[in-house]
């Protein structure tokens, strides 16, 4: 996020010894990972250049913008829309607290859209200044790799610039992809969904991942009728099964129509809207069809084959533990490597890269116990192993502690929505292996828990911590009774 | 709180009784039902059957020595009606009673009749936390926070035909219905645990006898957990003043209220009434609010509250309250007289409820403030009399009373002498914005450790950039320069209490700044700032003369 960036590094002296290269480091892509790596490298004294495509909220082969996915078409605008959408529930809840709110409440999507765009333009400017203050030279244009130590930047007017660099860092991120079905050109991706001219009345979302779930919540909160289609029994595969079930229940109780084990087979343009045909033969009419069916790394137009940078089957750049590709002078961080596609992870990878290459401290990013959040309404947050993973990986028994409760706010608002918290503990070592929560403030609550978990805190240490009363978070330190004990080697009981 | 209750009920059902039943079954001893265990003068207990899973030598309290010989389910001789008699069914008393009963003790608890306003003759099962503290306060905070949310919502595209108005009576009715529900739940919790509840005022007659409204009960151990009550100093016109009990149950909204006091209760009510659109003036004797809190937090919260419309009057001590002919109240202070208040509230401290308990007659020692003096195991100067919670005036927080009550039950009835642990207790102030904190303040840390590094962040949260409101967030980490341990963590801003809880686990576990740094952030949250503070705001080092020296360092970005 934008706030910490205002303190920044001094311009450092170019390294005389490496003067035969134009730059010590040239970075392609000024998103979270690229900006972080550039700034930190510069602060270690490296001479750094970075290139980025021209600004546009909707990304393409030729459009992007300093700040990258997180700032322009991911975390930040998404969270802004989640805030906007959350007010509907708040307004409903206020009534039993004595607030007389008129039945006629107007939500002005264009106003929010405008303010969101203003904010991301502001952040884009902050990021540019940040690079400038760090002494990083920014070029606008499309970067390509020409040789192991050479990049070419095609500027907007078509002129090409060529630079040599001792190290090249690829941090071009990824882009949303669409499912290949007839009529797919009628659908939109999350990029467009964050920038729609008009708020739809009826939206169909395809996908069960966090992006699909977040947009379902956003649109639902804004009064849009939402139908969510996903292939599995529950959304959010990869997360703890029990938590997935809770999210599904909450989405449904907030009014989202869930279509599990379903896919879309065709989209047809009609006068009334887009006709959506499902693989069960159902037909729906929607104003907008969002495909949240995955993202793929932006590696196609980088000319990587010229120097032989290896890619995996999905097109992601293959790297070693230090984020180095098979070409020793070329490195890659962030979503383009498809390791763990989260902003803070890209930041970590960028930091480690700078330390390793310019800080004289070889440093591997540690992808263990990375906490993450799904900003559904209410949100889900997780750190560590799911119950299923823990059972698979633990040597001995696994203890599961859960707490399901009616949050205090709901006792008066009357909202029927339970909060659930869960700790997964290794019975032998007492170590907390995983922590999960679905309910208001879950992402904020999990952050501190993540510190404890990352450092191997035991259940006893959780128990010895006094609660903050009255909070929801105190449940994490007051779970005294084990909900179930799963013996080593047994498969968890699920119907998923 | 409801949250606590949900899990508490689980504990009652799953932890104790099935375990007990299994043990009884194995030994082919008739299973005493919950009911019979309440009626029988001498229920069989784990300890009395010498079946303790923890076969340690008897504790220094020899809690069951008199009955250690009771075997084979035969009725042992006994001199007491109960193993434990608890006076006061608030957080500490209920916890101690339930746990004691779960460990097999026969337990009774007495409590005054229910009323939202406490007095010598009224109270209610649930105590301060549930009826006149944490719970109703938090419900009022929720209610009052909506006005801020309505304001925020404008910036996110929401518009109201008519601006939302607040109806006081709806809130009071719904709040009181919830309190009634909770006191009922607490009664059930006691009942399900097999604790006998006696309504009335308990008084100690001798080290093993309690008088409840004329009826005498004998007990091996007596627990005093009668809590505390708001204290209003005697000044002219103090009869017109309301305390926090009354403030939580006013018949109508105060139009203009003066709140005297700078502690957490004063600030919480200032936020509540301000959010519910009263005009709020806070009068504090000192220069700053929240004595004892981190200095930067004190400054920050006062500034944020002022921005939301609360007027602070510093260094003003109340001298008199005058009622004018139109019924409005004036507050006379050392600096002048402020007029036109519909209400004057005093949040000027709380005092332990130790009067008329018979403590003097049995020789239970008390401090000057009237708090019961206890040792590390919560034992008073009389070996059979114990005390937990606010009546002991140690750390007056519900979770601490719960900890003390739980520890006491273990000490007395599980052969596990347990001291409550007062290190790194997190706490919150539900002001608006709220505060969360754990560990030492900067001032305490310097005093104790000398060399400390201070990391701070003061930022405008994402929500405020859209809402256009002047809300900010302040966060602070205090790190020991020598050991790298995080000594203190403080935050003021939305969600602070929720955010700080998890960090409290880390601080309690003695984790280092490096451990914080190794943790990846959850993006985009406010909480992630605590794991991304790279550059100390200042490093405080003892100079040769031993005076702290603040060196501001700006090693940027790394």
Image (cartoon, grey):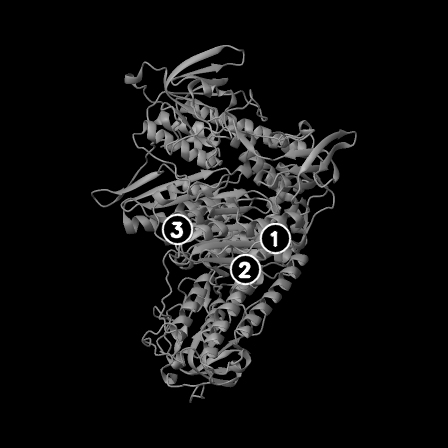
Chain identifier of the residue bearing label 1 in the image: B
Position of residue A34 measured from the top left corner of the image (x, y, whole percent): 44, 27
The label number, if any, that marks residue A315 in the structure image: none
Q: Mark 1 and mark 2: span between their CA atoms? A: 19 Å
Residue ranking furthest to the top: A159
Nearer to the camera, B72 or B66:
B72
Residue ranking furthest to the left: B544
Secondary structure beneath dot 2 equals helix
Answer with left or right where residue A387 lies relative to residue B154: left
Is residue B329 visible in the rendered image? The answer is no
The label number, if any, that marks residue B3 in the structure image: 2
Q: Above or below — where is A205 with respect to B121? A: above
Secondary structure beneath dot 3 equals helix
Q: Earlier in the sequence, mark 3 or mark 1?
A: 1
Q: Above or below — where is A122 with respect to B282? A: above
Q: Earlier in the sequence, mark 3 or mark 2?
A: 2
Q: Earlier in the sequence, mark 1 or mark 2?
A: 2
Nearer to the camera, A472 or B175:
A472
Q: Mark 3 and mark 2: span between their CA atoms? A: 22 Å
Q: Quadrant of the C terminus of chain B?
A: top left
Q: Mark 3 and mark 1: span between their CA atoms? A: 32 Å
Query: Badges 3 and 1: C-beta atoms under 8 Å apart?
Result: no
Residue picked out by circle 3: B506
Position of residue A492 measured from the top left corner of the image (x, y, whole percent): 52, 55
Chain identifier of the residue bearing label 3 in the image: B
């Amino acid at each position: 996020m934008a706030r910490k960036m205002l303190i920044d590094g001094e311009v450092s002296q170019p390294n005389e010894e490496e003067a035969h290269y134009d730059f010590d480091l040239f970075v392609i892509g000024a998103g979270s990972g690229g900006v972080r790596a550039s700034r930190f490298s510069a602060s270690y004294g490296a001479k750094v250049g970075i290139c980025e495509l021209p600004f546009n909220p909707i990304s393409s082969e030729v459009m992007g913008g300093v700040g990258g996915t997180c700032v322009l078409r991911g975390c930040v605008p998404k969270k802004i829309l989640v805030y906007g959408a959350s007010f509907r529930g708040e307004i409903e809840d206020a009534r039993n607290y004595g607030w007389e709110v008129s039945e006629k409440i107007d939500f002005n999507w264009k106003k929010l859209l405008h303010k969101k765009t203003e904010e991301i333009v502001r952040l884009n400017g902050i990021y540019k200044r940040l690079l400038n203050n760090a002494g990083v030279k920014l070029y606008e244009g499309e970067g390509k790799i020409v040789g192991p130590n050479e990049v070419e930047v095609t500027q907007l007017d078509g002129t090409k610039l060529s630079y040599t660099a001792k190290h090249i860092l690829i941090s071009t991120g990824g882009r949303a992809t669409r499912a290949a079905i007839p009529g797919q050109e009628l659908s939109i991706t999350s990029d467009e969904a964050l920038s729609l001219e008009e708020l739809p009345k009826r939206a169909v979302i395809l996908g069960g991942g966090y992006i699909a779930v977040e947009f379902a919540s956003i649109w639902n909160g804004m009064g849009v009728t939402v139908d969510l289609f996903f292939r599995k029994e529950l959304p959010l595969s990869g997360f703890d099964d029990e938590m997935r079930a809770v999210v599904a229940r909450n989405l449904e109780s907030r009014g989202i129509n869930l279509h599990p084990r379903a896919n879309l087979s065709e989209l047809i343009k009609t006068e009334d809207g887009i006709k959506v045909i499902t693989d069960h033969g159902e037909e729906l009419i929607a104003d907008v069809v969002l495909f949240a069916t995955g993202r793929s790394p932006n590696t196609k137009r980088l000319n990587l084959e010229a120097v032989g940078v290896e890619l995996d089957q999905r097109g992601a750049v293959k790297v070693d533990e230090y984020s180095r590709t098979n070409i020793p002078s070329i490195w890659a961080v962030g979503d383009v490597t498809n390791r763990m596609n989260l902003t803070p992870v890209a930041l970590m990878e960028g930091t480690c890269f700078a330390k390793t290459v310019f800080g004289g401290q070889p440093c591997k990013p540690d992808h263990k116990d990375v906490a993450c959040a799904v900003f559904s309404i209410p949100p889900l947050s997780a750190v560590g192993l799911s119950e299923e993973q823990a059972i698979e990986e633990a040597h001995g028994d696994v203890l599961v502690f859960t707490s399901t409760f009616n949050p205090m706010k709901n006792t008066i608002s009357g909202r029927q929505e339970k909060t659930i918290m869960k700790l997964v503990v290794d019975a032998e070592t007492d170590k907390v292996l995983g922590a999960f929560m679905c309910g208001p403030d879950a992402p904020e609550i999990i952050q501190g828990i993540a510190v404890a978990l990352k450092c191997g805190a035991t259940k006893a240490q959780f128990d010895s911590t006094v609660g903050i009363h009255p909070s929801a978070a105190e449940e994490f330190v007051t779970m005294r009774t084990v909900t179930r004990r799963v013996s080593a080697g047994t498969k968890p009981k699920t119907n998923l | 709180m409801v949250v606590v209750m949900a899990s508490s009920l689980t504990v009652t059902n799953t932890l104790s009784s099935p375990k007990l039943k299994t043990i009884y079954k194995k030994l082919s001893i008739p299973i005493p039902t919950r009911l019979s265990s309440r009626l029988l003068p001498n229920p069989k207990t784990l300890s009395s059957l010498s079946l303790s899973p923890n076969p340690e030598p008897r504790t220094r309290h020899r809690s069951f020595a008199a009955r250690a010989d009771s075997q084979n389910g035969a009725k042992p001789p006994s001199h007491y009606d109960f193993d434990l008699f608890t006076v006061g069914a608030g957080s500490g008393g209920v916890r101690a009673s339930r746990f004691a009963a779960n460990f097999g003790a026969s337990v009774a608890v007495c409590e005054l009749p229910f009323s939202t306003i406490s007095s010598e003759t009224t109270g209610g099962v649930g105590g301060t936390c549930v009826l006149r503290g944490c719970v109703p306060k938090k419900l009022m905070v929720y209610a009052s926070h909506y006005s801020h949310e309505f304001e925020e919502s404008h910036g996110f595209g929401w518009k109201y035909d008519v601006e939302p108005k607040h109806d006081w009576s709806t809130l009071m009715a719904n709040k009181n219905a919830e309190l009634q529900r909770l006191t009922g739940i607490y009664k059930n919790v006691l009942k399900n645990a097999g604790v006998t509840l006696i309504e009335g005022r308990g008084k100690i007659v001798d080290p093993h006898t309690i008088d409840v409204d004329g009826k005498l009960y004998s007990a091996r151990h007596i627990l005093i957990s009668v809590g505390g009550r708001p204290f209003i100093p005697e000044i002219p016109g103090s009869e017109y003043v309301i305390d926090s009990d009354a403030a939580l149950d006013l018949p109508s909204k105060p139009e203009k209220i003066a709140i005297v006091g700078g502690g957490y209760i004063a600030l919480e009510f200032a936020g509540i009434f301000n959010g519910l659109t009263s005009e709020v003036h806070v009068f504090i004797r000192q220069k700053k609010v929240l004595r004892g809190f981190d200095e930067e937090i004190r400054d920050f919260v006062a500034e944020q509250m002022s921005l939301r419309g609360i007027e602070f009057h510093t260094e003003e001590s109340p001298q008199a309250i005058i009622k004018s002919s139109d019924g409005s109240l004036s507050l006379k202070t050392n600096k002048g007289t402020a007029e036109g208040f519909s209400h004057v509230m005093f949040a000027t401290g709380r005092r332990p409820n130790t009067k008329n308990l018979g403590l003097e007659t049995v020789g239970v020692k008390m401090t000057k403030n009237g708090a019961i003096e206890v040792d590390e195991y919560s034992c008073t100067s009389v070996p059979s009399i114990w005390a937990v919670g606010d009546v002991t005036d140690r750390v007056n927080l519900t979770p601490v009373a719960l900890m003390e009550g739980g520890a006491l039950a273990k000490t007395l009835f599980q052969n596990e002498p347990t001291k409550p642990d007062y290190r790194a207790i997190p706490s919150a102030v539900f002001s608006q914005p709220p505060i969360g904190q754990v560990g030492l303040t900067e001032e305490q840390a310097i005093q104790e450790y000398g060399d400390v590094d201070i990391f701070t962040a003061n930022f405008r949260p994402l929500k405020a950039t859209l809402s256009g409101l002047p809300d900010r967030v302040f966060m602070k980490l205090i790190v020991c320069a020598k050991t790298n341990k995080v000594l203190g963590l403080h935050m003021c801003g939305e969600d602070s209490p929720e955010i700080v809880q998890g960090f409290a686990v880390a601080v309690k576990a003695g984790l280092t700044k490096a451990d914080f740094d190794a943790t990846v952030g959850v993006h985009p949250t406010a909480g992630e700032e605590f794991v991304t503070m790279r550059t100390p705001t200042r490093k405080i080092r003892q100079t040769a003369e031993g005076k702290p020296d603040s060196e501001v360092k700006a090693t940027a970005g790394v």
